[in-house]
Image: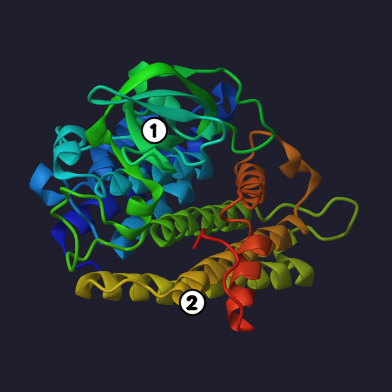
Amino acid sequence: MSAQEPDFDSVLEAVREIVPRLRENGPEAEDRRWIPDENIELLEKAGVFRIAVPRRFGGLDLSLPQQYAVLSEIARGCASTGWVAVAWVSTAWLATLYPDVTQEEIFATGQVRISGAFTAGGSTLVPTEGGYRLNGTWRFNTGCRGAEWDLVAATVELPDGTVDEAYALVPMSELSIADDWHVSATSGTGSSTTTARDVFVPAHRLVTVGEALTGTAEGRSNSGATGRDYGLLSMVISESVAIYLGAAKGAYETFVEGLGRPIAYTTWEDQREHPLTQHQVAVAENRIAAAEALFAGQLTLLQERADVGEPLTDTEKATVRGRAGHAIQLVNEAVEALNSVSSASSLARKGHFRRFRRDIEALTLHGLMNPNMSLEVHGRVLVGLDPGTPYI
């Protein structure tokens, strides 16, 4: 993940500089159930919303390992801001899988914020002249409150009469957003419910899920050995791992910074001197380092394959998901090790360490990123079975 492009260097450095401010804004993000406007402005100024946009539209078009590094740094400041950023950045990359005419529309300004809801539920796209009529509701739509576009899933009747599932790109201004994000963790992500009522979607703003998974939408010129065709789910999973790693580093940093006080009801005047504290800090640091090293190989694999235009095999895709699951499990255990030697004072809701812990624990429940589910998929291929799911 070494930097080769000046654009990457400047973006990464700019994000590192704002990490303290993102961390300071954490309590406000929780209180308002959405990240502060300042966070969005800081990310925009740093160039984050350009990192997945193709260069021909004025974007930075950073590689997957480089995007991963930037996103991880954001999460080191604030896990909720990182989760919003990964939603916007990974979905912007997904928009590069659409026909050229759609890309020209979406990337007109050289940067973009796109949220996404990838389960259709009962949502539908009904054919009409020039496109489709969209109706539906999508929960857990991370980043919708600050997005310019929304990419939503729905069932669709295709011209040949068959029914399929598709992703439609819709201006956020044409959707309604419910004030229903009341949760015990990741509060700042603003992952509210969005609703479409008879919204017109031009035909060029729709691709089937199959086309998205394989990158085979018609009228798309940026395919093949361009260095950016990673495979939809492997890409989304990989970028999401960056948030867990960055947030775990943030938790570790804030925990260590808070040491030095006496341990209540003991004769220890400085917690740093206690052997159990030393042991758990070492355990946490090593688990975070192990997770980072474990997943680095998957980033390298994805980038090498994209550079030569070769897709991953199903077994390799399942391995990406398994490595992601284990990396997430490791960082969750790392933060829990620190929590086991924290004090009652750390229970303060506005404490940085406690917020990192809450957010990491909550994000391990995400359906696609849950370690147990991901390790099951990986384990199936290791014992000679099929993955048992199309979500690889």
How far across and down, in percent of the image, does residue 255 sit? 63, 54
Return the residue nearer the eye: 146 or 178.
178
Work out which residue is located at the far right of the displayed protein and give it: 265
The residue under the point 37% across, 40% down is 88
The residue under the point 72% across, 52% down is 261
What residue is disc 1 on? 39
Q: Residues within 10 Å of mark 2 (few under 14, many from 20)?
A: some
> How many badges with numbers are in the image?
2
How far across and down, in percent of the image, does residue 350 sit? 64, 34
Q: Is residue 133 left or right of residue 316?
A: left
Q: Is residue 124 left or right of residue 367?
A: left
Give the quadrant of the N terminus: bottom left
Residue 70, compared with residue 41, is above or below; it is: below
The colour scheme of the drawn protein is: rainbow
Work out which residue is located at the far left of the displayed protein and give it: 56
Looking at the rendered structure, which numbered label has been put on residue 315?
Answer: 2
Q: Residues within 10 Å of mark 1 (few under 14, many from 20)?
A: many
Q: Nearer the viewer, mark 1 or mark 2?
A: 2
Q: Is residue 259 visible from the viewing direction of this image?
A: yes
Q: Is residue 293 visible from the viewing direction of this image?
A: no
Return the residue nearer the eye: 176 or 137.
137
Indicate the amino acid at tag 1.
Asn
Return the residue nearer the eye: 344 or 334.
334
At numbered mark 1, what does the secondary structure look like: helix, strand or loop? helix
Label 1, label 2: how many angstroms apart (C-alpha)?
A: 39 Å
Indicate the amino acid at tag 2.
Thr
Residue 218, compared with residue 330, is above or below; it is: above
How far across and down, in percent of the image, does residue 360 sit? 61, 50
Sequence-wise first label, 1 or 2 = 1
Residue 176, compared with residue 125, is above or below; it is: above
Q: Quadrant of residue 70?
A: bottom left
The residue under the point 63% across, 56% down is 370
